[in-house]
Image: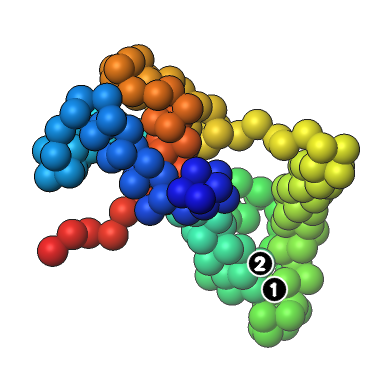
């Protein structure tokens, strides 16, 4: 029953399987197995911050892009600054540049291709991913690569324990952990 629950992705069941495997292989008490498991868990989380950096970078850059987009298109001072530095297009007459909508009409001439190109790229990538899933191929991401590599390292570091149990635990172990008090 425990193996079935662990196979469904329940991390607590996966942890319990590893502890029971330690007890079985090393013939130790549950308390000793828990301390050995703590070493295994710490080993599994080595260099974690380096592997989740791309995810944090993606989140950060998405939030920054969303926050910068509207002012760059509709806010007069940002639009003038961007135009002077990067675009160098002649500004419209001041009476045609008073409201945010008039600023947006001016900036849209050079922001439209950029925004639409980025959006089109993301739509195409999302569509391709959906089609891969439709035919039964799970797209390989950096995160999946990292989890497989991490589980292989853990199995190599602790060869005395069942590799499939360690692999299930390692791949199911969350990348972000609640801070312990």
| Camera-side mark, 2 or 1 | 2
Is residue 145 at least partly visible in the picture? yes
Q: Please tell me the numbered disc located at residue 39.
A: none
Seen at 78% across and 71% down, the residue is: 105
Query: In the image, residue 181 lies at what x, y percent?
Result: 13, 64
Verify CB contact (< 8 Å) between mark 2 and mark 1.
Answer: yes
| Camera-side residue of 88 and 133 | 133
Q: Residues within 10 Å of mark 1 (few under 14, many from 20)?
A: many
Seen at 14% across and 39% down, the residue is: 29
User: Is residue 16 depicted above or below 28 in this figure?
Assistant: below
Is residue 78 at least partly visible in the picture? no
| Camera-side residue of 112 and 40 | 40
Q: Residues within 10 Å of mark 2 (few under 14, many from 20)?
A: many
- On the image, numbered disc 2 is attached to which residue? 73
User: Is residue 13 depicted above or below 45 in this figure?
Assistant: below
| 102 relative to 9 in the view: left or right | right
| Camera-side residue of 42 and 105 | 42
- Is label 2 in a helix, a strand or a loop? helix
- Is label 1 in a helix, a strand or a loop? helix
Whole-number angstrom distance, CA of label 2 to CA of label 1: 7 Å
| 33 relative to 65 in the view: left or right | left
Seen at 41% across and 45% down, the residue is: 14
- On the image, numbered disc 1 is attached to which residue? 103
Seen at 61% across and 69% down, the residue is: 70
Query: In the image, residue 73 lies at what x, y percent?
Result: 66, 67
User: Is residue 80 depicted above or below 113 in this figure?
Assistant: below
Count how many numbered circles sit on residues in the image: 2
N-terminal-most mark, 2 or 1: 2
Q: Quadrant of residue 26?
A: top left
Query: In the image, residue 132 lies at what x, y percent?
Result: 82, 38
């Amino acid at each position: 029953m425990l193996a079935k629950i662990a196979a469904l992705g329940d991390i607590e069941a996966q942890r319990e399987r590893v502890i029971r495997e330690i007890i079985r292989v090393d013939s130790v008490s549950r308390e000793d197995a828990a301390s050995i498991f703590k070493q295994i868990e710490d080993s599994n989380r080595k260099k974690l911050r380096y592997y989740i950096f791309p995810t944090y970078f993606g989140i950060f850059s998405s939030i920054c892009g969303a926050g910068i987009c509207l002012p760059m298109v509709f806010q007069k001072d940002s639009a003038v600054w961007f135009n002077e530095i990067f675009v160098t297009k002649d500004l419209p007459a001041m009476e045609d540049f008073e409201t945010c909508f008039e600023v947006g009409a001016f900036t849209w001439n050079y922001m439209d291709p950029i925004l639409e190109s980025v959006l089109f790229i993301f739509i195409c990538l999302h569509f391709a991913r959906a089609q891969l899933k439709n035919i039964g191929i799970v797209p390989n991401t950096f995160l999946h690569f990292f989890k497989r590599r991490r589980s292989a390292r853990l199995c190599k570091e602790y060869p005395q324990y069942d590799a499939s149990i360690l692999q299930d635990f390692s791949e199911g172990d969350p990348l972000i952990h609640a801070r312990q008090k």
